[in-house]
Amino acid sequence: GDHKHQELTFTVRKTFEDPSITNYIQAFNFLNTTTMIGPSYIIIGGMNSGEGAVITKEQATIDVMSLADELQKGSFFVLETNYDNWKPAPFFDDRRNPAKECLNQLTPKGINGFTGLYNVLSAKPNLNKLTTYTTLMNVKTGAFEAYRQHCEGICSFW
């Protein structure tokens, strides 16, 4: 069969395990050029300022939103909410605009380790009935926190 298209989970794992991939640029290039079986959003971060991106794929890459570009525009983050970032968020599941508003209010100082970011991700509408977990990672320190999530009370199903 045709084995040139890769599955996302195994591709990400290979990125971590391949001894020839030792830095952000190499990892980004590998993920950006690998052809996938189907659509995906790959969010990647590095250890240095400006190292971060959301890679949007069908099978090939169709868009890259880089942190370096967003920094030049005055933003300090890239954000992905499971919808193509160049299209308006759907009216029934607009998590993008509330998350942007919260992050802009926090500012980089307000992120405060994982606390500020966790609060953004764990507040409605970002937390909804389909949210199963939230994971926070810091490449520079190696910190990793994962939380099972459950939206109590009235929550969107999206």
Image (tube, rainbow, N blue to C red):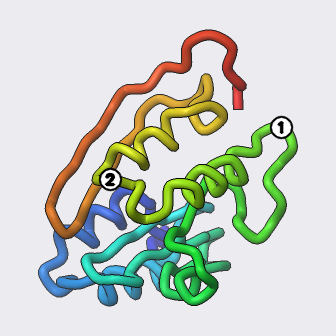
Image coordinates for residue 117, horizontal then vertical, percent? 42, 49
Foreground: 61 or 128?
Answer: 128
Residue 112 circle label: 2
Circle count: 2
Instruction: Identify which amino acid the numbered label 2 is placed on.
Output: Asn
Q: Secondary structure at mark 2?
A: loop
Crowdedness near tag 2: few (<14), some (14–19) or many (≥20) residues, C-alpha within 10 Å = few
Instruction: Identify which amino acid the numbered label 1 is placed on.
Output: Phe
Write the residue at 72% across / 53% down.
Answer: 97
Q: Pointer 2 and pointer 1: residues touching (CB < 8 Å)?
A: no
Which circle, 2 or 1, is nearer the viewer? 2
Image coordinates for residue 58, horizontal then vertical, percent? 65, 69
Q: In this rendering, is residue 108 above or below 154? A: below
- Residue 67 relative to residue 114: left or right: right
Write the residue at 28% across / 72% down.
Answer: 15
Write the residue at 59% across / 50% down.
Answer: 102
- Residue 38 relative to residue 91: left or right: left
Image coordinates for residue 17, horizontal then vertical, percent? 17, 69
Q: In this rendering, is residue 131 above or below 98? A: above
Residue 47 image-quadrant placement: bottom left
Task: Measure the alpha-carbon separation of dots 2 and 1.
Answer: 31 Å
Q: Secondary structure at mark 1?
A: loop
- Residue 67 relative to residue 128: left or right: left
Q: Which residue is mark 1?
A: 92
- Residue 50 relative to residue 90: left or right: left
Write the residue at 76% across / 40% down.
Answer: 93
